Image (cartoon, coloured by chain):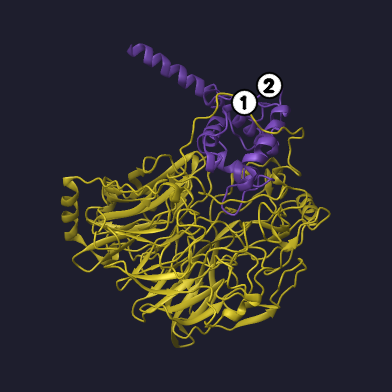
């Protein structure tokens, strides 16, 4: 069933030895978010505002051949340790090792998982891997699409025989539940990078997109700790409590027994000194309908702190009661040692889709600034259960839009605004936590939301500057999600409601990557001719441009995407800027000709930030074509003190993964994953031209 | 031989420069877009939505973000992306004709004008048609 494909050459080991002499801890990037605190920060300064625009491509690594088809969704953040770059890549999700200076492929390890891989809920290359060393051995750990934990020798890419069974732990086993319907097709997987802290590997779980679940019943997304030396399971945390555990009674009518999902699909953060793990938990089964799971549903959409050694819960805070908006806690919690009114606090800050930055004392779980339970609108979807209140942080203020109000609508011209008001009249709108509606042909068609499914800060997460105590967070500020509910046909789902729009067929909504990985049946060559589709006379969809735009322009006004700097000592936003060039459709729009429209930023969920000694670095998530450059996107730098532009460098495609940086042999590099549109996945490493790097002090 | 290659290259270059047609020039027919609509609903809508607005993590195929992302590229590139990778769980399943019809439907929803002829189903021919978010 499985085939392993290591490739290694004699030169590899030489490269590994040679670079060992110039190690500097600040210059390495040993885990997904740079460190276990989730900072994405490195105090390097060779690349700075004076030279950022002079960056050149040091090397590129095209991932097309890592798998049997190209991938257009390369999301990895590579690691760099001891002169070697490690990452996942390709439709195979292979682990690869590259020379950090030249990009030369040192080894590749892929797993052929057959039907199990083809049935996996989260396919394609994933977000990365984990590195571990005890000073002698070095290991690489990653999770395959088929939910198997692989342990490799970092030097050779060969499986470590003493770990699990020949280097593999089957994560569908020993999970305090029987994964249904069977090990091959049972829905559970993971696309994020494992975390290793003090010899414990921590693994979460992910499922299919939850807009249209097939059933109210699903497998549960428990979190487990494993021994990095043996692969033995050390502990498990039940994200949906079992009958004798606290929190079980927040699932009324026994719904904890059958409800699933509620996994931790994003990055996990660890305080090794305190021995505490911070788990950002996602939504329970049914992103938008919770009628089959009445109650608050702990630990859905909660930040949970567990003991690193035992997995025992220390504290939790539910950010959304009875989740109905797909406000998964979608990114790594950030550890921050801050100082509030003269009081030193070991804090954890949680960015979110809903634009709130939740800040807690990470030892006690108490909010640093009060979080108030406020009454929220109660909906009227038949069978739904509503929480009367939701938690609202009083500080810092929301850093991105999390509701739709008429003030948010496009207002370039009065006519555009009127057109937007006409469109919005068919929908239900309101502030954060405005509940979904049953879609009706005469209206409302849906609740129009911002800061839900793809809004605010998604999986790339935010960054943190431990010197200045500032969180830097990219957020989509205009990712509009209509949430309407419709009764599905029985063949589609046994739920009373799933996402759907009145007047349209209720369909299973799939997510990216499903059925697209290397284990899925190979693309067959198409039939020579013939169409085989049902015809239709009227070509245009209602309203054109998808119905939620005005003359092809976004319904919501700019800024469409932002980066915010948030001071954690004060709980205040220090600066906020639009991130990303004004999209072509706006810059070139005849209706806007002659208007001076400031840079609008761009919508998108896949932008991550990198913080260095002086810069905030983030790529653009959309392609533009401007007088200054051909079709492509910019990797941008900002002065981290002010948010002012500090340079930009051209990329052939938008970013699809978050940038990282490292220093090897006195030279600083930045790697970023790009892909999308007509451009398949590629890691690009940038560095300064030889002349530029001389004379700069290196960190 | 060498001259032959050079001549071919030159023709190729001229061809690219000669790509004066754009999506504003009536490059598909209404009937074709109508067929494409049926195919789209059957094969594409589950990820990209009935309204082409995209899903939580699937890109939109209509409106400003779509047009910005493809502006300056050609229909050949869009067609090849669709032909080789879509539908994502059955990539390559649809015929070239079907993919051309779907491309025509995408153009129609983005309000590019229909014309009298159908969109060809060869990437080489489609590379001669530029995607321009605004009429020049």
Q: Quadrant of residue A519?
A: top left
Palette colour of chain A: yellow
Residue at 54% in and 39% down: B86
| Disc 2 target residue | B117
Which residue is nearer to you in this view: A208 or A257? A257
Label 1: chain? A
Residue at 58% in and 84% down: A370
**Dot 2, how many residues are within 10 Å of its Cα: few (below 14), some (14-19), or many (20+)?**
few
Residue at 53% in and 33% down: B83
Residue A358 x, y percent position in the rendering: 54, 75
Residue A639 x, y percent position in the rendering: 44, 62
**Dot 1, how many residues are within 10 Å of its Cα: few (below 14), some (14-19), or many (20+)?**
few
Residue B30 x, y percent position in the rendering: 73, 29
Q: Do the residues bearing badges 1 and 2 touch, measured as CB atoms within 8 Å? A: no
User: From mark 1 to mark 2, how far is it between C-alphas?
Assistant: 18 Å
Residue B14 x, y percent position in the rendering: 49, 19
Palette colour of chain B: purple
| Disc 1 target residue | A530
- Which image quarter is the C terminus of chain A in? bottom left
Label 2: chain? B
């Amino acid at each position: 069933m499985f085939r392993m494909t290591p490739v290694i050459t004699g030169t590899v080991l030489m490269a590994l030895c040679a670079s060992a002499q110039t190690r500097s801890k600040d210059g390495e990037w040993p885990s997904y978010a740079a460190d276990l605190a989730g900072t994405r920060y490195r105090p390097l300064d060779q690349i700075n505002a004076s030279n950022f625009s002079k960056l050149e491509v040091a090397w590129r690594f095209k991932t097309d051949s890592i798998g049997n088809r190209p991938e257009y969704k390369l999301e990895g953040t590579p690691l760099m340790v001891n002169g070697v770059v490690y990452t996942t890549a390709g439709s195979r999700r292979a682990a690869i090792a590259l020379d950090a200076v030249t990009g030369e492929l040192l080894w590749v390890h892929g797993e052929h998982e057959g039907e199990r891989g083809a049935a996996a809920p989260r396919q394609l290359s994933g977000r990365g891997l984990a590195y571990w060393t005890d000073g002698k051995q070095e290991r690489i750990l990653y999770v395959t699409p088929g939910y198997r934990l692989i342990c490799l020798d970092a030097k050779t890419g060969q499986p470590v025989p003493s770990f699990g069974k020949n280097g593999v732990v089957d994560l569908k086993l020993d999970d305090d539940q029987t994964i249904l319907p069977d090990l091959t097709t049972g829905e559970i997987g993971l696309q994020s990078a494992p975390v290793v802290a003090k010899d414990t590997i921590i693994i979460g779980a992910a499922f299919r997109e939850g807009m249209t679940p097939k059933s109210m019943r699903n497998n549960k997304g428990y979190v487990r700790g494993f021994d990095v030396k043996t692969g033995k399971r050390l502990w498990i945390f039940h994200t949906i409590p079992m009958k004798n555990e606290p929190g079980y009674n927040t699932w009324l009518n026994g719904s904890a027994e059958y409800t699933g999902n509620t996994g931790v699909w994003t990055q996990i953060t660890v305080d090794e000194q305190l021995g505490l793990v911070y788990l950002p938990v996602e939504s329970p089964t049914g992103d938008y309908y919770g009628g089959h799971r009445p109650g608050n549903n702990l630990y859905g959409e909660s930040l949970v702190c567990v003991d690193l050694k035992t997995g025992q819960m220390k504290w939790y805070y539910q950010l959304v009661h009875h989740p109905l908006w797909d406000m998964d806690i979608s990114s790594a919690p950030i550890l921050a040692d801050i100082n509030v009114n003269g009081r030193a606090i070991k804090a954890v800050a949680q960015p979110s889709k809903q634009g709130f930055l939740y800040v807690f004392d990470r030892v006690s779980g108490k909010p640093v600034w009060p979080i108030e339970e406020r009454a929220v609108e109660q909906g009227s979807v038949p069978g739904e259960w509503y929480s009367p209140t939701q938690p609202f942080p009083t500080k810092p203020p929301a850093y991105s839009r999390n509701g739709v109000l008429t003030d948010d609508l496009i207002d370039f011209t009065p006519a555009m605004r009127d057109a937007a008001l006409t469109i919005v009249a068919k929908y239900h709108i309101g502030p954060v936590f405005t509940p979904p509606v049953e879609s009706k042909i005469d209206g409302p068609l849906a609740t129009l939301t911002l800061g839900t499914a793809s809004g605010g800060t998604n999986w790339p997460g935010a960054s943190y500057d431990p010197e200045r105590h500032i969180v830097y967070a990219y957020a989509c500020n205009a990712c509009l999600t209509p949430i309407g509910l419709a009764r599905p046909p029985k063949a589609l789902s046994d739920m009373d409601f799933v996402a759907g729009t009145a007047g349209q067929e209720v369909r299973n909504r799939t997510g990216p990557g499903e059925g697209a990985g290397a284990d899925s049946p190979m693309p067959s060559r198409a039939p020579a001719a013939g169409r085989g589709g049902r015809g239709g006379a009227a070509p245009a969809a209602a309203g054109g441009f998808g119905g939620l735009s005005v003359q092809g322009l976004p319904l919501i006004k700019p800024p469409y995407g932002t980066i915010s700097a948030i001071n954690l000592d004060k709980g205040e936003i220090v600066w906020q800027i639009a991130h990303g060039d004004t999209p072509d459709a706006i810059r070139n729009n005849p209706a806007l000709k002659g208007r001076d429209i400031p840079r609008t930023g761009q919508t998108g969920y896949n932008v991550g930030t990198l913080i260095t000694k002086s810069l905030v670095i983030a790529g653009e998530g959309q392609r533009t074509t401007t007088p200054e450059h051909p079709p492509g996107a910019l990797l941008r730098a900002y002065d981290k003190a002010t948010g002012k532009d500090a340079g930009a460098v051209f990329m052939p495609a938008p970013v699809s993964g978050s940038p990282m940086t490292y220093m090897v042999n006195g030279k600083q590099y930045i790697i970023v994953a790009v892909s999308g549109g007509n451009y398949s996945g590629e890691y690009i490493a940038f560095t300064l031209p030889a002349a530029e790097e001389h004379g700069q002090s290196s960190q | 031989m060498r001259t032959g290659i050079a001549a071919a290259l030159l023709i190729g270059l001229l061809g690219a420069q000669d790509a004066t047609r754009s999506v504003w020039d009536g490059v598909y027919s209404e009937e074709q877009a109508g067929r494409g609509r049926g195919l789209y609903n059957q094969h594409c809508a589950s990820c990209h939505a009935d309204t082409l607005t995209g899903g939580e993590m699937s890109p939109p195929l209509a409106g400003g973000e779509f047009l910005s992302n493809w502006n300056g590229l050609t229909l050949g590139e869009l067609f090849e992306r669709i032909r080789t990778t879509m539908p994502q769980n059955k990539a390559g399943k649809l015929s070239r004709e079907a993919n051309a019809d779907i491309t025509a439907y995408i153009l129609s929803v983005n309000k590019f004008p229909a014309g009298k002829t159908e969109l060809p189903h060869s990437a080489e021919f489609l590379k001669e048609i530029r995607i321009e978010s605004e009429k020049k």
